[in-house]
Amino acid sequence: MQNDLLGTLAGSSAPRSTSLARRIAALSTAVTLACMAGHADAADVIRSASGTFGQTQWQAQSMIVGTQSTATSAGGGNPAYFAPMPKYSGVVTLIMDYGAAGSFICSGTLLPDRRSILTAAHCVTDAALANPIKTTAYFYAGSNPDTIPAISPDATAIDIGMYFVNSAYTGEVIDQNDVAVLRLASDAPAFAASYDLYTDELTGADYNIAGYGARSNGGGNVGANLGAGRLRQGDNSYDFRMGDADFTGGWELIFGLPTEQIGYSYLADFDNGLAANDASCNVAGDPFFGLSGPKYCDLGRGLMEVSSAPGDSGGPQFIDGKIASVTSYGLTFGSFYGDIDDKRNDTFGEFNGFVPVFVHADFIRYAMSVPEPGSLALLGLGLIGIGLSGRRKRS
């Protein structure tokens, strides 16, 4: 287990190899299970992967840090990142109890049936381990932006009764199927907003992201870890998906994963307005990836540009007030591609990875439609009664 909030990348800013054969021969990937401490009482469920491909080094972590400080109001945090209510009242804290392994935090979003929470699969399973011993969703719609719902008497806590994990989820850090639906044991509180699904293409679209993840008093310039558990929001844009037609298979070679698993994984970089740290543009300028350079260059959204961070896992990206994707992981290729400090720690020059809703709309709707176990039992009794009645009539 790793205890520091901001994971490190043992990287190098040495020039990249231009030999494809050399890159393939040098490809090595190590995947480990790791937890990153967030709020003192809970940590995000994080799996990390890292590797080298020739002289290109990368690190990804399945996991809101703003351009400026996201500290508390008393600590000088910029109020631009506060999440006004009731707009965000359906974005929930999820606390997963894994027994001896500890309790962990993720984010989730209330779906239209008001009994289901959309989140990331890696929050509740690694595709091998069972669900947590217990998961609780915390709803809050008060006026204090610094409230931590998981420990606040003003929050409404509802346990999770059923888990629906996408059957195609592999447990890999980068997986376009990293999505799950959790069924509440009772209806969400009346004050909580619910959100429909956005099912259009995402490339180039602007989004708003919300979550209970780690914050920083230095924003994208590193700063101190201020812990998770307080809701924040901000903006960014989807740059591209790994399976974009502009690509020539570079992602698959680097990660050693098939297109069917990562092709619909969407990336958004964390910009600071400087071309040197425009990771999307820098990657697009590398012939190895086969992208059309300038069309992927964008210096960001200014003050409201944000990155996801540990604890935001499973949280939403909104377009037109609808859920467009789910927060899945963070990714860096180091300083050569624009990361300001060569570490996978939610700073300028890194990528955020998202799972799109439109690919999984059928799965999500199916999960919302499955009856509760008690309802299934009653339904079975009803069918038995109908069968007996039919036999009596025939006799």
Image (cartoon, rainbow, N blue to C red):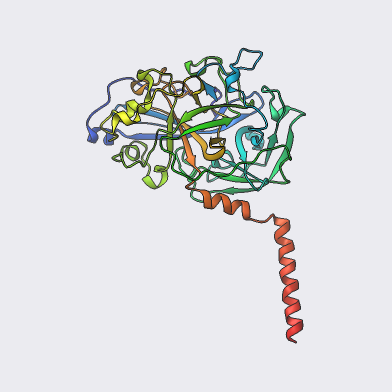
- Please give left or right for residue 377 compared with residue 237 in the image: right
Residue 344 percent coordinates (x, y): 45, 24
User: Is 69 located above or below residue 391 in the figure?
Assistant: above
**Where is residue 19, by image quadrant?**
top left
Residue 52's x, y, as percent?
Answer: 34, 30
The one of 211 and 180 positioned closer to us in this rendering: 211
Residue drawn at point x = 56 percent, y = 24 percent: 3
**Rendering coords of residue 300 (x, y %):** 43, 24
Q: Is residue 84 left or right of residue 51?
A: right
121 vs 215: above or below:
below
Look at the picture and state if 77 lies above or below 38: above
Q: In which quarter of the view is residue 318 placed? A: top right
| 331 sits left or right of 285 in the view | right
Q: Residue furthest bottom?
A: 395
Q: Is residue 63 visible?
A: no
How many numbered marks, from 0 up?
0
The quarter in which the N terminus is drawn is top right
In the rendered image, the residue lying farthest to the front is: 320
Side of 17 relative to 125 (left or right):
left
Is residue 320 something that shows in the picture? yes
Task: Pick the residue in front: 300 or 33.
Answer: 300
Identify the image quadrant of the C terminus.
bottom right
Q: Residue at x 74, y 35 (%)?
A: 156
Query: For this rendering, which residue is in front, 21 or 83?
Result: 83
Q: Quadrant of residue 159 in the image? A: top right
